[in-house]
Amino acid sequence: MDFKKNDSIVMEIEDMGADGQGIGKPDGFLMFVKDAVIGDRIEARITKLKKTYGYARLEKVLAPSSFRVEPVCRFHRQCGGCQLQALSYEKQLEFKERKIRNNLIRIGGFSEELMERIMEPIVGMEDALHYRNKAQVPIAMDKEGNPVAGFYAGRTHNIIANTDCALGPEENQVILETVLSYMRANKVSAYDEKTGKGLVRHVLIRKGFASGEWMVCLVINGKRLPAKEKLTGALARIPGMTSVSYCVNVKNTNVIMGDEVRLLWGSRTICDSIGELTFSISPLSFYQVNPVQTQKLYELAVEYAGLRGSETVWDLYCGIGTISLFMAKKAGFVCGVEVVPQAIEDAKENARRNHIENVAFFAGKAEEVLPQKYEQEGIRADVIVVDPPRKGCDEKCLDTILKMQPEKIVYISCDSATLARDLKVLCGGGYELVRGRGVDMFGMTVHVETVCLLSRKAQ
Ligand code: SAH
């Protein structure tokens, strides 16, 4: 290989990496090119070279791929959010199916033959835009000292102003502009990460797609919000506005939310429904961002659990109890475990609200609550559902699941790499992977949800 940094090269894009970058192999050398699409013929400039691979910057598309589409957002290249906007949606789904399979094979050690036999076709979205019910928008001061709302330019913490993200509802823009004009009129500053000074860090917006209710929560670097009635007065005029609050986060951290929420106007929570169930959601609770696909995901999880009416189910990482309540209608008893105490409060309220009595919720870490209940109280389970964050399940949690020997495990995952790692442990401990399916909850991005069913092997 005699490439050098800054060389201009011409290549065909033959593949796409897990983060959505195009992959070419000029002279057999592996080259990653952001924003290039599989099937493109491109001209690119080499930016970085390693021993066995390199990176290049897309300079010109010489012959566009037949899978290329016109991106809807003019910021799609700068913003790290939508890695696949230039790829047709059909091809995005193919990319995601392949990503899940590759991880299960490479990391999980499953065979291609098994994948061929058990993986079901991915569940795609009808409309891959405007699907997100939640936005967490960073706020900063521009060079002229005006507050701006926008997004971090790919992998950096520089904010580019844009209040019109194509993944969220169009009304987000009105809400953000209302917050910005309140800030300008009342000389409220935006937080500066470098100096740790300034007040407003993020704006959290949530919409109940089924209920039409809106929640706005300002995340601030301080204990008080000045001229707060000016803000609530303006936001309250927006149709459907239900909850306005602020959240205190004075730490120098990348974590967006703090631990404490103070209500400014309206109610503490908003409502939303998925299928026949209604849920209360507070600002600190996790709630799936794509409600349309969430219903399909939950129905699939219930189907995989194959409940007959008398089972004991444990739902680990239960959030506000959504999956627990979906399962409860078909099970004997369901217990949910979740680390965020406010989410457990929401879960209990959600059980009451839906008149579901065969459930119990416990606040704490899955890897602590489950072993404790198993060792001290001898709890058992017919089905265990896990839906962990991206980092997957803790070893101690997997270990206890294996000791409890449920008949079935339903694993819902938003990161197929950690899913594959955990499935390898569970399948090494007497379980067999019998069904699996991707559900696209995050159109335009490289992310995908996966549901897998494991069944205990006959001894
Ligand atoms: N099943 C829920 C939530 C899934 S998201 C739903 O579909 O809405 C993952 C959840 O795991 C989040 O609510 C997060 O707060 C919680 N969590 C993260 N680490 C945890 C841990 N160690 N133990 C229990 N819950 C955890």
Image: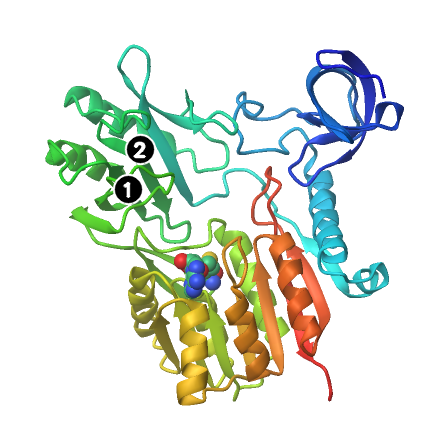
Q: Secondary structure at mark 1?
A: strand
Name the spot of residue 376 as percent of width and height, x first: 40, 87
Name the spot of residue 149 as percent of width and height, x first: 35, 26
Q: Secondary structure at mark 2?
A: helix
- The amino acid marked with disc number 1 is Val
**The C terminus lies in which quarter of the figure?**
bottom right
Crowding at mark 1 (Cα within 10 Å: few <14, some 14-19, many 20+):
many
Q: Is residue 445 left or right of residue 152?
A: right
The reply to whether residue 285 is in sight is yes
Q: Nearer the viewer, residue 238 or 187?
A: 187
Can you tell me which quadrant of the image ligand 1 is in?
A: bottom left
Q: Is residue 267 left or right of residue 77?
A: left
For residue 307, which quarter of the picture?
A: bottom right
Crowding at mark 2 (Cα within 10 Å: few <14, some 14-19, many 20+):
some
Name the spot of residue 117 as percent of width and height, x first: 82, 65
Contact, mark 1 vs mark 2 (Cβ under 8 Å): yes
Spatial separation of the CA atoms under disc 1 and disc 2: 8 Å
Image position of 459 with respect to 14: above or below:
below
Image position of 268 with respect to 69: above or below:
below
What number is the disc on residue 175?
A: 2
Q: Nearer the viewer, residue 340 or 360?
A: 340
**Between disc 1 and disc 2, whose residue precedes?**
2
Image position of 205 with respect to 111: above or below:
above
* Residue depicted at x 63% and y 72%: 304
- The amino acid marked with disc number 2 is Ile
For residue 447, which quarter of the picture?
A: top right
Q: Nearer the viewer, residue 220 or 300?
A: 220
* Residue depicted at x 43% and y 45%: 133
The outermost residue toward the right is 27
> In this figure, which residue is indicated by the disc labeled 1?
216
Ligand 1 near label 1 (Cβ, under 8 Å)? no
